[in-house]
């Protein structure tokens, strides 16, 4: 099974180790678009034997967000005819299905004729910066369901005609032969809030990368928060955080208010023997 992953990077040397530790067991080829990193990220990327580094070019000179959207809607198409799955994600987004190794989950989905796997989003929390050798989905498992992180990140490039990502990939309108799994087991664990002081400093740095169009539309507004605003957001997530690794946890039951890819009143299929025989052939069309 071949999996290509596409992502962007800008000054993320302190978290790239977590990213590669999470995805190396499943990814065949990484294509990383760098936006001018100066913190050692490029050295880390170039040392990885499966990484292809490219320069991120802003197709909208006054908007990082629109340029990112254009890239994410198009670049994966080069994997047609060469990859079983593509992953379009961010460095701080770790895709994980509780009770599965991600390669096994994707293999089961492929055998079950699934072609697109949206993920249920969780804002993960860690007051302290994790140790460099941690596998975050195993060691930092406290998080709160977060609608903004409900994203389409994994799909079959031969089956999907267009992804239709909106700004930030917060929604998608995929077209083509779109077949969803019968229940939402895949999670997007968003490791943005790891280390409070680090997150505050990171926001300030990212604010400088926004263009006039981004600011006009309030895209990335959180990057301009001061410490008290970030603390209020952090504490609000912490107040409803759960352990996504707890026994009996089910992502589809813990999901936030809406899953844009499911109709009102949708009921996820029970797991049955899924962990022994895969997802079966019961897919659902979008």
Image (cartoon, rainbow, N blue to C red):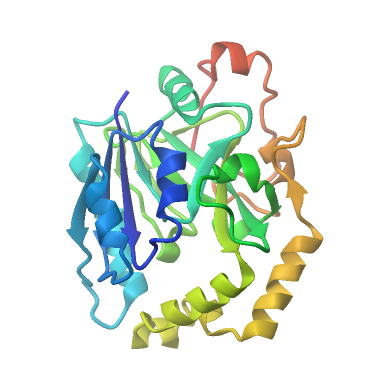
The answer to whether 102 is drawn above or below residue 230 in the figure is above
- Whether residue 146 is visible, yes or no, is no
- Whether residue 76 is visible, yes or no, is yes
Q: How many marks?
A: 0
Q: Is residue 131 left or right of residue 267?
A: left
Q: Residue at x 44, y 61 (%)?
A: 14
Q: Residue at x 50, y 16 (%)?
A: 281
Residue 123 found in image quarter: bottom right
Where residue 139 appears, x then y in whole percent?
A: 64, 43
Q: Residue furthest right?
A: 239
Where residue 202 appears, x then y in whole percent?
A: 49, 74
Where residue 252 appears, x then y in whole percent?
A: 68, 39
Q: Is residue 3 left or right of residue 168?
A: left
Q: Is residue 26 left or right of residue 134?
A: left
Q: Residue at x 34, y 35 (%)?
A: 27
Quarter of the rendering occupied by the N terminus:
top left
Report the front residue among 187 and 229: 229
The answer to whether 255 is drawn above or below residue 240 in the figure is above
Q: Residue at x 42, y 39 (%)?
A: 23
Report the front residue among 185 and 15: 15
The answer to whether 98 is drawn above or below residue 199 in the figure is above
Where residue 46 appears, x then y in whole percent?
A: 22, 51
């Amino acid at each position: 099974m071949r999996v290509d992953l596409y992502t962007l990077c800008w000054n993320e040397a302190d978290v790239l180790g977590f990213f590669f530790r999470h995805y190396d067991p499943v990814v065949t080829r990484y294509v990383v678009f760098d936006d001018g990193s100066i913190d050692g990220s490029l050295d880390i990327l170039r040392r990885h034997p499966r990484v292809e580094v490219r320069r991120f070019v802003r197709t909208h000179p006054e908007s990082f967000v629109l340029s990112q959207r254009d890239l994410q809607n198009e670049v994966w198409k080069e994997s047609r005819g060469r990859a079983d799955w593509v992953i379009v994600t961010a460095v701080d987004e770790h895709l994980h299905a509780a009770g599965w190794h991600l390669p096994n989950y994707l293999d089961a989905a492929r055998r079950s004729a699934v072609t697109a796997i949206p993920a249920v989003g969780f804002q993960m929390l860690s007051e302290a910066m994790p140790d460099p050798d941690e596998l975050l989905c195993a060691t930092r498992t406290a998080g709160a369901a977060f609608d903004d992180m409900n994203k389409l990140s994994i799909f079959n490039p031969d089956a999907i005609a267009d992804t239709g990502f909106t700004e930030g990939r917060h929604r998608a309108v995929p077209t083509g032969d779109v077949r969803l799994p019968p229940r939402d087991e895949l999670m997007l664990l968003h490791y943005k809030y790891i280390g409070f002081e680090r997150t505050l400093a990171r926001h300030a740095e990212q604010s400088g990368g926004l263009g006039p169009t981004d600011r006009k539309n309030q895209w990335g507004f959180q990057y301009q928060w001061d410490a008290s605003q970030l603390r209020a957001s952090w504490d609000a997530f912490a107040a409803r955080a759960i352990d996504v690794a707890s026994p009996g946890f089910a992502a589809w039951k813990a999901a936030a208010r809406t899953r844009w890819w499911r109709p009102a009143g949708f009921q996820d299929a029970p797991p049955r023997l899924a962990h022994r025989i895969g997802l079966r052939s019961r897919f659902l069309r979008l």
